[in-house]
Image (spheres, grey):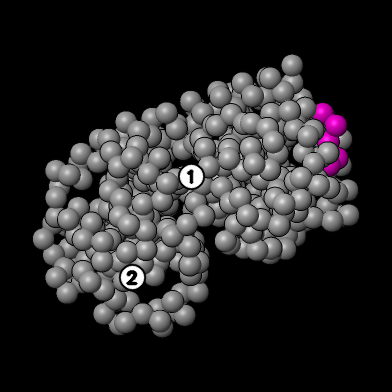
Amino acid sequence: MRIGIVCPYSWVIPGGVQAHVRDLAEQLISLGHSVSVLAPGDDELPGLPPYVVTAGKAVPIPYNGSVARLQFGVVSAARVRRWLRDGEFDVVHVHEPAPPSLSLLTCMISDGPLVATFHAATTRSRFLSMFDTVLQPFLEKISGRIAVSPAARNVIVEHLGGDAVVIPNGVTVARFAEATPLPGYPRPADGDGGTIGFIGRYDEPRKGMDVLIGALEQMIDERPGLRLLVAGRGEAAAFRAGLPRRVSERIDLLGQVSEPDKARMLRSVDVYCAPNTGSESFGVILLEAMAARTPIVASDLQAFRRVLDNGAAGVTFPTGDSAALAKALGALLDDPARRKQLVDEGTRVVAPYDWPVVVQSVLRVYELAVF
């Protein structure tokens, strides 16, 4: 099958949708399908996978509580049209068609079988409000609708008046389970030490770093060996400048890391912490932590509870409550048996999300759209 996939967000900026598109494309290619991915990005980007076609520079647009780098306009439309013509695809799969992006342009231009995946769970958006008006004719062209979670499915039901099959985000379990820890890790977790992990843009409020910093302040006096290992983008100097010195010296900032190093980082920590405060439709990072056999403490968001099987595969705490987070982290760091139990449960929970399983569900949607 000739498959075209459209990623709306800049390929060079790490994100859940970009990772989903990358892993889906590589799984499909491994099964013998011909795949081309269209994404925003400069033509001269180094290290691009051979299946990625760049469509030019993206611009930052506020979306879903963050800033998305998207591409839209007359020039972009011409590039979408050329990609569709040259690809001669059996099916085209767009991701996040709501914001002004390559995905939306593809919905407008394509006249072949069209599948769309909705990732975001935000129901209040000026882009979504246009679904019922000018965009409706274009979105009605979508013959296969996928939501990554029940929350994302609700967006489709509310704004498109239709339904969607829920197919969760996937994770390549072996990549994380077989990764080797970073040098010097993991550190001793019992007594006065241990290492907590965090992945994400640490200066983005909804990621909850302020909540985690508040928890660290309450923990470090009794745990002189405690460390926080952070992977992700952010203004490091400004971030450290806003921290008490006794907290700053406990934090190791790795910066933006590669996918292999992300897996190694997750294998290096004793507990992974997801202190997010909202606007999460799923929680891919929780799947990756479970795949890496790392116990989890996460905020009590509906999407996180669902991924963690209502707390069977991870400890949850009241969202935004630093004191409760400190208590949960300390208790887990001091309890090796509980950590092992969570790892075993996580291994069970993550198995259905393994990409070789998930990709078969996606292929069934393609087949229905085509035939």
Query: What is the three-letter code of the residue carrying label 1?
Result: Phe
User: In this image, 84 relative to 247: left or right?
Assistant: right
Q: Residue at x 62, y 63 (%)?
A: 67
Q: Position of residue 170 (x, y in %)?
A: 49, 36
Q: Residue at x 32, y 77 (%)?
A: 248
Q: Residue at x 19, y 52 (%)?
A: 332
Considering every residue shown, the one lying at the far top of the view is: 371
Q: Under tag 1, what secondary structure?
A: loop
Q: 10 Å neighbourhood of mark 1: few (<14), some, or many (≥20)?
A: many
Query: What is the three-letter code of the residue carrying label 2?
Result: Ile
Q: Position of residue 254 (x, y in %)?
A: 41, 64
How many marks are shown on the rendered structure?
Answer: 2
Q: Nearer the viewer, residue 165 or 18?
A: 165
Residue 242 vertical placement versus 47 (above, below): below
- Residue numbers of the magenta segment: 107-112
User: In this image, 352 relative to 154: left or right?
Assistant: left
Considering every residue shown, the one lying at the far left of the view is: 191
Q: Under tag 2, what secondary structure?
A: helix
Q: Residue at x 40, y 81 (%)?
A: 242
Tell me the residue that label 2 is attached to: 213
Q: 10 Å neighbourhood of mark 2: few (<14), some, or many (≥20)?
A: many
Callouts 1 and 2 close, C-beta under 8 Å: no
C-alpha separation, residue under disc 1 versus residue under disc 2: 23 Å
Would you say residue 65 sits in the magenta stretch? no
Q: Position of residue 155 (x, y in %)?
A: 61, 43
Judge whether residue 53 can be spotted in this image.
no
Quadrant location of the C terminus in the rendered image: top right
Tell me the residue that label 1 is attached to: 282
Q: Position of residue 347 (x, y in %)?
A: 31, 34
Would you say residue 110 sits in the magenta stretch? yes
